[in-house]
Amino acid sequence: MVFFETSGPNEAMVVSGMCHTRPLVIPGGRVFVWPIVQRLQRLSLNTLTLNIDTPNVYTRQGVAISVTGVAQVKVQSTNEEMLQSACQQFLGKTETEMRRIAQETLEGHQRAIMGTMTVEEIYQDRKKFSKSVFDVASSDLVSMGISVVSYTLKDIRDSEGYLLALGMARTAQVKRDAMIGEAEAKRDSGIKEARAEQQKMAAQYTNDIEVAKSQRDFQLKKAAYDIEVNTRKAEADLSYELQAAKTKQRIKEEEMQIKVVERAQQIQVQEQEITRRERELEAQVKQPALAEKYKLEKLAEANKKRVILEAEAAAEAIRVKGEAEAFAVEAKAKAEAEQMAKKADAWKEYQEAAMVDMVLETMPKIAAEVAAPISQARKITMVSGGDGEVGASKITGEVLNIIRQMPKVVEDLTGIDITKVCTYSFFNCDDLIL
């Protein structure tokens, strides 16, 4: 009779006996077992958690400390050799026995590692300590078919207060470093804050500069665009005005052409009207006017002949009258010439007497000219020194004084003393007086 056996993934079945020169190990599966001739044993593959406590172990410095570690171990089922070794070591033993063997092995390795390190190394570098225990213990437990899944240092303690003092020193150092770090952090924070503020202000100034540049560029571009737009607009306005002017010019030309045509038609109409009026006038006015002109021409010729005859008669009368007047003038001129000749002959004979005669004839005119301004004066103001005449007699005396100076003027001009000539002439020139 054959039995069919199965196992879960957390255990391995070991079949030994007939048909097997070496035990058949089956981790987590099924197998047929012959009773009596074959034997079936089971090996646990569960992970075992071990608390490894090593109290009062002296370190390299001779300081006694206690260390507690936690390790997880299990029988390695993936490696056939390790599984065969585990069967040889633990087959037929309980899980508690397996735990005890693995724990004692780890405790021994943990003690050995603690003796090679200082308290500070174990305390400060737990990872190094755990790695050392893990490496040393794994090399020994592998030969038993057990693999160390993990190892962690759980606790370090001492009974002398070494760790406390180390912690206090470390705490003080940490506090010091913390204060220094805080001061440095504040300093760095202040520096970074100042730098940040500086960078902020620089960025702000740069931004303001860029904004100002952008505004300047915008204003320049806007001004250029405005100039271009205004130029185009002005060109468009000028083009529009030019086109409008051209259109108006064409309209005016068309209107003028229309007016010319109308004027030409009016001229034609007027010419036709003039022709009609001319013919009408010729019929109504010209022909009668020609007749009247002929009549007037004939009448004018008759009047002309009559006027000519009358003028000839009048001219004859005027000629006769002129001849009579010319004869009278000629006779008068001859009489005056004879008188002048006689007078000249008398002057030749009586030169000084003639000159005196002329002076005497001129003196009344001179007196009149001297007295003329006085006769035209409305008011005469005379100033007297108290001697001599005053009033109208004074004026008469002034005029007479001017007349008395005339002989001296005549003598200076002609060399003739008219006072002597007049006296002589008065006695000897009876003819001149006559």
Image (cartoon, helix red, strand yellow):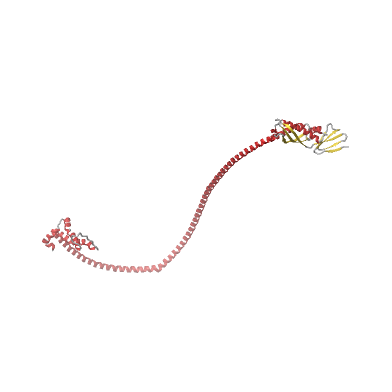
Residue 284's place in the image compared with 209, above or below, is below
> Image check: 293 left or right of 406?
right
Q: Give the residue at the far left of this rendering.
A: 428
Pick whichever, 55 or 336, lies toward us.
55
Residue 156's place in the image compared with 347, above or below, is above
Do we see residue 150 in this rendering? no
Image location (x, y in percent) of residue 348: 14, 58
Image location (x, y in percent) of residue 217: 53, 46
> Image check: 399 left or right of 113?
left
Q: Which quadrant of the figure has residue 433?
A: bottom left
- Which quarter of the rendered picture does the C terminus lie within? bottom left
Q: Give the residue at the far front of this rendering.
A: 160
Q: Residue at x 27, y 68 (%)?
A: 310
Q: Residue at x 44, y 64 (%)?
A: 270
Do we see residue 248 in this rendering? yes
> Image check: 137 left or right of 415?
right
Pick whichever, 73 or 350, lies toward us.
73
Image location (x, y in percent) of residue 129: 71, 33
Image location (x, y in percent) of residue 159: 72, 34
Q: Which quadrant of the figure has residue 122?
A: top right
- Which quarter of the rendered picture does the N terminus lie within? top right
